[in-house]
Each structure stands twice: as structure tokens, then as C-alpha cells.
Image (cartoon, grey):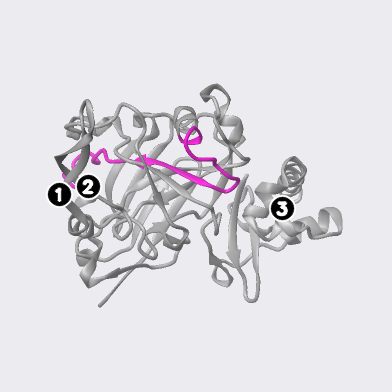
Amino acid sequence: MKIASVRGEAEDFLVVEGLNGYVYSLPAALQILTGGVPEWSRDMLVLIEAGEEALDSLRQVGDLLAQRPDAIEPIRPESITWHPPVRRPSKICCLALNNSANADRIMSGPNHPAIFLKAANALVGHGQPIIVKEHYGRVHPEPELAVVIGKTARNVKASEALQYVFGYTIHNDITSPTMRQEDTFHYRAIHPKKGDHDTIEYVDTFVTYPGRYKCSDTFSPMGPWLVLRDAVPNPHGLSVRCDHKGELVTEDSTRNLSHKIPEVIEFVSGYMTLLPGDIISMGTALKRADGTGKAVQNVDLRVLGGPVSVSIETIGTLSNSVETSL
């Protein structure tokens, strides 16, 4: 089942997709089924925290739509605004350079997953604009599969990790290499001298921080749909593509992820507790589409504008316009 967070004329609520591709109000469907509208039908995070009872009701809604597609009036797409599926996750954990199709670009790095965090202010929904200011410099898309955590995960073993997944969605990890370069320090770090903790030595070091170049407002388009875990039996066999102004840029597969989802959940949960609704973005699909000769890094949204879209098999298509400003 596909679920999304939207806003109607005066309220936020969840919607589901029917077999015919139409969009239906989850509160309206539950009203028909149960005669009531639970709070979790209006907020994805509340739904995730509601657990199995809510999931059972969701399955009943799916059955209703399959058996009686005319029982509920579909929603007019122009009457809703799409939110990111989870609007207020406690954190968005992103994997750096996690694509084996481009492993030859890594000159040195860890053998384990490398994590950075994005802030919830960067989130924006399907159909909403990516804001690119002139001083941001070069800004490009990064198409990624995102994992939505379903229950508190701490020190989870890889063999049990998929039990902690609620579902999957699409993330466009917008990045500004210009701001990354501007915020990179080349300095002499102070270290205790080896074998002598009373003496210091200086070590030539490069370091950068993703505060601006990854976390600026609208730098995390996400959605439109969250697909429940059971509907994606093999998350490591999904095709991924990125299109810019209708032109195919990247055509890749999640099979090229260097570190797979169970390993990543085990690694991340060993350092930071994952909470319901948290996001793990699995790393950029970077394999160039045959014949285009273009990489996502060439798609400078500040200069070329949009729209830009990311499509992942089984999940759907996330599309956003681009607005430039001073």
C-alpha cells in the first residue's frame, strides 16, 4: 500500500493510492469502514507509532478500495498539496558515497558506512519548489532510496534489522558543492603526540561540515509516497532514475548500494538510537544513463532550473520545480 501526507483546503491528513491510481482520503475511508476517524489517519508519524492495530486497519482500507473502488470519491489532485511523508522526523541519516558503481572514485575512506545528518527544515514535498539562491553556487540533485524506521532501534543486529523498517520512500538529496568548498577547512589539528600524552603535535587536516551545503531549506525533497515494507520484498533490486526537464540523466539500481539496508541499520543504531519516523537515505544513484554522457553533478539547478524528478520502481516519482532567487 502507498500512503502520503497532504494538506487539503483547511487540514492535514493522509491519503492512499487505489489500484486505479486514484488518490483517496484515509480519514474518509476509515469513516466508511469503522464509523470513526482515528488521529493517526492525519499524521504519518502518529500512524507509525500506532503500530499493528493501525496497520490492520490500513489493510482493510486496501481491501475496501480493491473490492469497492466506487465506495469513496477520489480526491482531485489540484485540491491537495503534498507534504514529505514524515514531516517531522527526529533525524535524516544519509549515507555518503554508498554506490559501488562509482567505487573507483574513492581514493581513501572507511570500510564501514559513513553517515551525515540532514535537518527537517530541508524537507519539502512532491510538487513543491526547490529554492536555489544565487550565492549558493552550483546545486545538483542526488536520487536516493530512503528507509523509514517503524520502531525504536538501538544496537540492532543486521539479521533482525528489516523488522524495524516501516516502509520506503524517495529522497532527492540536493547538494551544493560550492558551499561545501567554501565551508572546508585546511588546518593543523592538534593531537597528543604518540606515546607522549603531555606533548602535542600538529597534523595537516581537511574537514568540512554539511550545515549549509546539505541542510539549506528545500534541500530534501521527499515523497510523494511511502510504500509499506511488505510491498517491497527486495529493496536491493529496485531501478532508480533521475530526469531533468524530461531528459534522462541517471539510470541505476539499488543493487549497486555498497552497504545494504540491514548492515546500515545495524551500524547506525550502534551509535545513535533510531526513533519511529526517522529516515535513512541510502546513498546516491550515480550510474550515468547510457548515451547521455551526463552525470547528476552536471545538472546545475541554479543555472539550468527545473523540473527535476526521481523515480524508483514500486514507489513512484518525486518531481519538483526549481525557483531561483537572490
- Say which element carries label 1: strand
Residue found at x 39% / y 68%:
129
- Magenta residue check for 122: no
Sequence-earlier tag: 3 or 1: 3
Sequence-earlier tag: 1 or 2: 1
Q: Which residues are magenta?
A: 268-295
Q: Is residue 147 above or below residue 217?
A: above
Where residue 241 sits, quadrant-wise, is: top left
Front position among marks 3 and 1: 1
- Say which element carries label 3: loop
Q: Which residue is mark 1?
A: 187
- Residue nearer the viewer, 73 or 278: 278
Q: Is residue 264 above or below residue 92?
A: above
Q: Which residue is mark 2?
A: 207
Sequence-earlier tag: 2 or 3: 3
Q: Residues within 10 Å of mark 3 (few under 14, many from 20)?
A: some
Q: Which residue is mark 3?
A: 69
Marks 1 and 3: in contact by CB < 8 Å?
A: no
Rounded to the nearest whole Å, what is the CA distance between mark 3 and mark 1?
64 Å
Q: In the displayed image of the protein, which residue is found farthest to the right?
A: 35
